[in-house]
Image: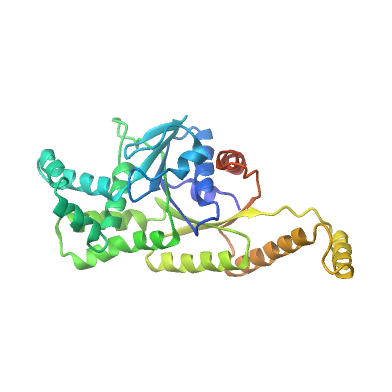
């Protein structure tokens, strides 16, 4: 499958379990877009602005902050924090900007916004939409595409539920209108795509499919499941047969036995995924993972070549 299925969206939400290479894939996508001459914004959802940036490790450049920072040519990085989202919401909702700044200094309000159900995720969502709407002063979007690296599977589901939850519990007002806008953007398949990253193993693939079903319940369009680190198969059919015979004769003590098992597990997992998802599956090969930067560079070239 060509990655063009999701490369024509303005907002890409990248999610998946920890350890599947989700952040490296986000960085690779950013590099692929940048090679096409597009201005890319990479948003990293973090609880606090002092959280170490994994995206920076994969892309290089200066440390990202709560305001977009140029990391490399055509690629900007930003930390998506609930606090900045709350501030931008108050600045838009209150008639005088200084009132918003003063309100955010209130410890009571800070505690409420961080503790009230859904308000932390609402802050992230509002900030994400705020950056998506920025223009270049000529009526065109400042960023051609915005990538959001979600920290965990559960967070993606929480983000999916927030707009609908808020529109149900709030009868009106600025928060209701912000939630309506968020719901409209997140559920529009022409604007937003969710990409689930997984590994070629039975359990990660099963979890990816469960996540897809959960996101679809909240109408988030899942455009692709990306299977990362698919092992290269160097064996012909005859070589496999001979290797299995050698493994059986030597009770498994054969060089390459473990690799063959890994290749076959990957094949089984991919067949199981194909049986449940006939399209929208992208496989990526194993690359040099000595550093996240080298891995994202190589995968970025592969994605750019397929686009």
Asked which quadrant contains residue 243, the reply is bottom right
Residue lying at 58% horizontally and 68% vertically, measured from the top left: 203
Q: Is residue 238 left or right of residue 223?
A: right
Residue lying at 13% horizontally and 39% vertically, measured from the top left: 97
Q: Quadrant of the C terminus?
A: top right
* Residue 225 picture location, percent across and down: 54, 58
* Residue 210 picture location, percent across and down: 49, 69
Q: Is residue 33 visible?
A: no
User: In the image shown, does 271 or 57 lie closer to the viewer?
Assistant: 57
Residue lying at 42% horizontally and 32% vertically, measured from the top left: 62
Q: How is the image coloured?
A: rainbow
* Residue 272 picture location, percent across and down: 63, 69
User: In the image shown, does 241 or 5 lie closer to the viewer?
Assistant: 241
Residue lying at 17% horizontally and 43% vertically, measured from the top left: 91
* Residue 258 picture location, percent across and down: 75, 61
| Count of marks overlaid on the render | 0
| Above/below status of 78 relative to 192 | above
Q: Is residue 213 visible?
A: yes
| Above/below status of 203 relative to 222 | below
Q: Is residue 239 left or right of residue 226?
A: right
Q: Is residue 152 left or right of residue 232?
A: left
User: In the image shown, does 21 or 53 lie closer to the viewer?
Assistant: 53
């Amino acid at each position: 499958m060509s990655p063009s299925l999701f490369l024509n969206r303005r907002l890409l939400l990248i999610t998946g379990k920890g350890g599947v290479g989700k952040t490296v894939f986000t960085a690779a996508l950013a590099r692929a877009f940048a090679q096409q001459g597009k201005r890319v914004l990479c948003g990293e959802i973090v609880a606090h602005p002092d959280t170490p940036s994994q995206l920076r490790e994969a892309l290089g450049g200066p440390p990202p902050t709560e305001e977009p920072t140029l990391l490399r040519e055509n690629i900007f990085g930003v930390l998506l924090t609930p606090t900045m989202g709350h501030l931008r919401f108050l600045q838009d909702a209150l008639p005088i900007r200084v009132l918003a700044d003063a309100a955010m200094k209130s410890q009571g309000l800070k505690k409420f916004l961080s503790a009230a159900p859904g308000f932390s995720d609402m802050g992230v969502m509002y900030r994400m939409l705020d950056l998506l709407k920025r223009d270049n002063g000529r009526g065109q979007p400042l960023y051609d595409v915005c990538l959001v690296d979600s920290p965990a599977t559960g967070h993606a589901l929480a983000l999916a539920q927030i707009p609908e939850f808020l529109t149900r519990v709030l009868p009106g007002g600025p928060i209701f209108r912000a939630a309506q806008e968020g719901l409209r953007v997140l559920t529009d398949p022409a604007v937003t795509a969710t990409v689930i990253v997984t590994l070629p193993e039975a359990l990660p693939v099963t979890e990816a499919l469960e996540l897809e079903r959960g996101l679809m319940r909240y109408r988030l369009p899942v455009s692709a499941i990306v299977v990362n680190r698919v092992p290269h198969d160097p064996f012909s059919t005859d070589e496999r047969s001979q290797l299995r015979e050698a493994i059986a004769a030597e009770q498994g003590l054969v060089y390459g036995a473990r690799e063959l098992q890994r290749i076959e597990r990957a094949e089984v997992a991919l067949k199981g995924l194909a049986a449940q998802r006939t399209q929208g599956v992208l496989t990526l090969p194993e690359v040099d993972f000595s550093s996240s930067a080298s891995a994202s560079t190589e995968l970025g070239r592969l994605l750019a070549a397929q686009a």
